[in-house]
Amino acid sequence: MTRPFIMWSLLLLFATPLLAEDYLIQAGDQITVFLPGEASLTDPITVDRQGRLLLPEAGPIPVAGLSEAQLKQEVVDQLGQMFRDLDNLRVYLFKKQMLIRVQGYVQNPGEFTLPADATVQMALHAAGGIRNGAQLNQLSRVRDQVSLLFDYKKYLDSGDLNHLPALQSLDRLFVPASPMTGNVEIEFDPATIADSGDAAANRLAIKVFGEVNSPGSFSFRTSMSLVDLLMRAGGVTRYASVEQIRVISAGKPTLFNLTHYLDSGDEKLLPPILAGATVFVPQQEEQIKSGANTVYVMGEVAHPGAFEGQGNATFMDILANAGGPTRYAESRQIRLIKANGEVVKFDLAAYTEGTLESQPPTISPGDAIFVPEKSDMNEKSWLMVAPDRAVRVIGEVVRPGRIEWSNEMSLLDLLAHVGGPTSRADTSSIEVVTPITENRSKTTLFDLDAFIKSGASDLQLPEIRAGSTVRIHDLPRDPANNKSQWVRQASEKSIYVFGQVGAPGRYMFTNAMHFLDILAAADGPTGSADIHNIRVTHRDGDQAQVSKLNLALYFETGDEQLLPNVRTGDTVYVPEKNRIWLDQPKEKMVRVLGAINRPGRYRFDDSMTLLDLLAEAGGPTTNAYAQKITVINLSCCRDQARSFDLLSFSRNADFTALPVLRAGDTVYVPDRRESNIAKIRVGLRDVFELFSLATMMGQL
């Protein structure tokens, strides 16, 4: 007895109590279909929402509403189309379940699989429970588009399940939100609400609002003072103007100075608080500071504002009192705006590095120090960087744009600042346009690859100054779709690949590459390529030169000297096989004629035999007279012909009987009708026909 059959027997033993004569299959039930020897029919299968049982072998089967016997018969009818022996097929209900959707004001609305005897309480628990603010007395169960309202609050008060409706598969429970929550959903804490005011609906309540931590309406008590009210409101905030607290009591406004009261402790200063009073704590207002010795600091400093300057206060003293520049400050472009309107520029970064010979500017009363913000490299505004201190970087870099320039920088610093070249950048030919005069510029081509490879010094980098333009070209795309890119690719940097390659076209090439690089870029030779006769045309000299390459010999020997040296501007041509009538003289070819599948001219070398040639020509036809294959040899003195019996060779495999074959020879395979036996047979047939005709004439 097999293990699957034993397991199935145990499952059947435990699953039998689930079955009932009057129970009908519903969506969500798990059905077990077991057939010994079929691994795909072992795991329980759940009936989907459409009431279908999805069998791996038979597809969907409608089973909802069927009894146990009907279920088994339906499965047998479907599986009987694919299996012959269904004697051991067992179909039974593995687990009773139902699908319930819970929607509305619950923690996790959705569809859930529950036991067949699940209640509304279990369905709500599966959805994470009811959320605060739900209307418990208006829950509804929707079945077949019919809604049934029930009071879930009564069940919670009594625990009586009779207040809950029964559930069945595909029912939908909806939990509405209480109308008291309004249209805006917020999380609230009852304790916080009570602390924020306990008399919202009381006309005699005292209203406290403004710069307090917990504004609200508070119940009135006769012993309450203004300080008690402020304490109940959580105290004043840091922005409160405690010298200007306003109190309206019995319709009479009063101005109260809390600071004065706290300094003196005189309770007579407290205004009277009557029922229905209003207390407002205003926000403190900053006073404008000005004076004869005031110096103003603005922009990207830690504490901008107005500072009282002493007679011996220096530029650095004022800047230090303002907390110094922030991390976003452009410390190279600090401006001092004098009281008379003069603007003085100061490079704080160069001064701190010791590269600035001049001293900080002198500060006078009424002056203003402005520390600008660093220009964002992604900022599109032209006003962020002035043209007289910007460098333009365009082309294949990560972040092209206008970059603020400093003479301490180099081209490498500039490229690093813009994120460096992209993966499609042609770093072997970077263009740098530097202005010389107002009407003239100088263009320099820079090979970054060669610079890095040689380890050259920064002195060999091209000159860049404010107003320069750096352009980095992009590499060409796939030659099959780069026709529009040809005008941007210089011919002196290109190499041409034609013929039988995967992607012929025009390719970017550098002198650091070799022949195999360009052949691989063109996707290599195709299946019809003649790799024995590749031609490379060199165009870099005074006269054109052509190199021949036997790529097959290179693959056999690995000799690198066989590969030609290619340079930019060269042309590579890979010819096609068997299209060599005009390329090869007859002395280098072998002709195959007669009853052969593919007669024609074929290339031949000394490593081949007559059998190789016949195989390349497709072999003899069915009418070929293989006993008399003729080989006509072309020698220096005279031509000679030899016969070869292919059938005899196939029986004895005597390789010494193979005729010698050389380039320039001709192989002829005669037709069976040209043999002597065929001619005798035709002659005998003619004799018999004449004899028969004479006999018939004699009888007449």
Image (tube, rainbow, N blue to C red):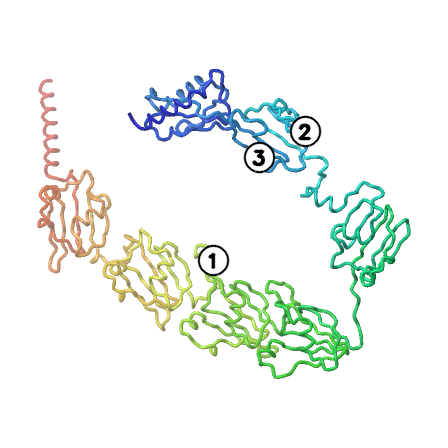
Where residue 659 appears, as percent x and y from the top left, is 11, 51
- Closest to the observer, 473 or 496: 473
Q: Is residue 547 left or right of residue 220?
A: left
Q: Splitting the image into 4 quarters, where does residue 379 fall? A: bottom right
Label whose residue precedes the other's in the sequence (3 or 1): 3
The Cα atoms of the two marked residues, 3 and 1, are separated by 61 Å
Residue 255, relative to residue 150: is it above or below?
Answer: below
**Image quadrant containing the N terminus:** top left
Label whose residue precedes the other's in the sequence (2 or 3): 3
**Residue at image x 68%, y 29%?**
137
The residue to which callout 3 is attached is 127
Residue 324, relative to residue 479: is it above or below?
Answer: below
**Kind of residue sitting beneath label 1:** Lys
Label whose residue precedes the other's in the sequence (1 or 2): 2
- Front of the two marks 3 and 1: 3
Where residue 283 appears, as percent x and y from the top left, is 78, 58
- Closest to the observer, 231 or 102: 231
**Kind of residue sitting beneath label 2:** Gln
The Cα atoms of the two marked residues, 1 and 2, are separated by 71 Å
Q: Is residue 393 left or right of residue 305?
A: left
Q: Does residue 88 appear in the picture of this structure?
A: yes
The residue to which callout 1 is attached is 483
Residue 420, relative to residue 168: is it above or below?
Answer: below
Please, what secondary structure does the residue beneath circle 3 have? loop
Badge 3: residue crowd in 10 Å (few <14, some 14–19, many ≥20): some
Where residue 700 appears, as percent x and y from the top left, is 11, 18
**The label number, if any, that marks residue 138 in the structure image:** 2
**Kind of residue sitting beneath label 3:** Ala
Q: Is residue 93 left or right of residue 298?
A: left
- Closest to the observer, 177 or 642: 177
**Residue at image x 71%, y 38%?**
181
